Image (tube, helix red, strand yellow):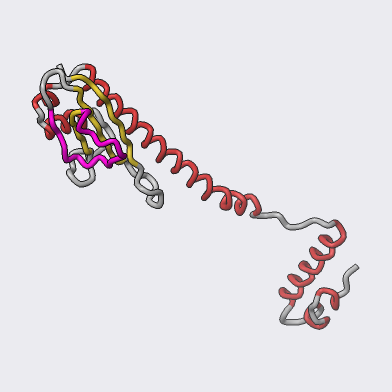
């Protein structure tokens, strides 16, 4: 059994009488709880689940937002690929005539989550050129070339588009695709 000196409280603090009767009762209750906890080995675990929830919530939330970011990237990549492959199999009139802005508008109409698709700086960049004019080294898609060629030419249609950004600290992810087709 604990005595008041083992509780690191002076003896007179625990057993005063008179005006501090309420504080004496409180101190006696604390002493009794300390004695019970020491004898039984129990610990007060109130609020432990709230702390555990708070520790798990933030990493779980970041993980979910990261997964959502990559879902948007995959969706943008797939939609861009579908637009280019459908253009290669059945070229639109804008593509054959060399109307870059008209073709960009047509591709952007197929992209539901892209609000800045037609923006010249941050939107989709599309290039079209003859296959024999394409450099053999890796080159960035700048959107500067849009040459329709002549009938029977083998053309390369390349496009790049940034995915919508969900998580600010993940760098901007970009979908890219290219397709080779023969102009009708």
Q: Determine the residue positioned at 29% across, 35% down.
A: 136
Please check the rendered image and state whether residue 27 is part of the magenta-colored stretch, yes or no: no
Identify the residue at horizontal 52%, vertical 50% (top origin).
58
Q: Which quadrant: the N terminus?
A: bottom right
Q: Residue furthest right?
A: 1
Q: Residue at x 38, y 49 (%)?
A: 171
87 relative to 73 in the view: left or right: left
Picture coordinates of residue 138, whole percent (x, y): 31, 39
The one of 36 and 183 positioned closer to us in this rendering:
183
Residue 178 x %, y %: 28, 30
Residue placed most toward the observer, 147 or 124: 147
From this view, report whether residue 134 is shown above or below residue 28. above
Q: Is residue 3 left or right of residue 178?
A: right
Residue extent of the magenta highlight:
131-148
From the image, which quarter does the C terminus lie in? top left
Please report the residue visible at 33 percent of the width from the left and 40 percent of the height from the top: 174
For the stretch drawn in magenta, the main secondary structure is: loop
On the image, which quarter does residue 25 sit in?
bottom right
Towards the viewer: 33 or 181: 181
Q: Is 9 drawn above or below residue 75 in the view shown?
A: below
Indicate left or right for 168 with 133 as reference: right
| Residue 5, image quadrant | bottom right
């Amino acid at each position: 059994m604990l005595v008041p000196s083992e509780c690191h409280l002076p003896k007179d603090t625990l057993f005063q009488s008179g005006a501090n009767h309420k504080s004496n009762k409180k101190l006696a209750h604390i002493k009794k709880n300390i004695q019970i906890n020491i004898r039984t080995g129990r610990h007060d675990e109130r609020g432990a689940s709230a702390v555990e929830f708070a520790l798990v919530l933030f990493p779980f939330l970041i993980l979910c937002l990261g997964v959502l970011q990559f879902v948007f990237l995959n969706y943008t990549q797939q939609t861009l690929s579908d637009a280019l492959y459908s253009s290669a199999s059945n070229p639109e009139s804008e593509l054959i005539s060399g109307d870059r802005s008209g073709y960009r508008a047509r591709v952007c109409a197929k992209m539901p989550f892209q609000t800045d698709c037609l923006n010249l700086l941050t939107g989709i960049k599309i290039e079209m050129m003859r296959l024999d004019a394409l450099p053999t080294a890796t080159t960035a898609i700048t959107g500067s070339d849009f040459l329709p060629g002549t009938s029977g030419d083998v053309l390369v249609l390349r496009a790049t588009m940034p995915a919508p950004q969900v998580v600010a600290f993940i760098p901007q992810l970009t979908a890219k695709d290219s397709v080779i087709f023969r102009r009708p």
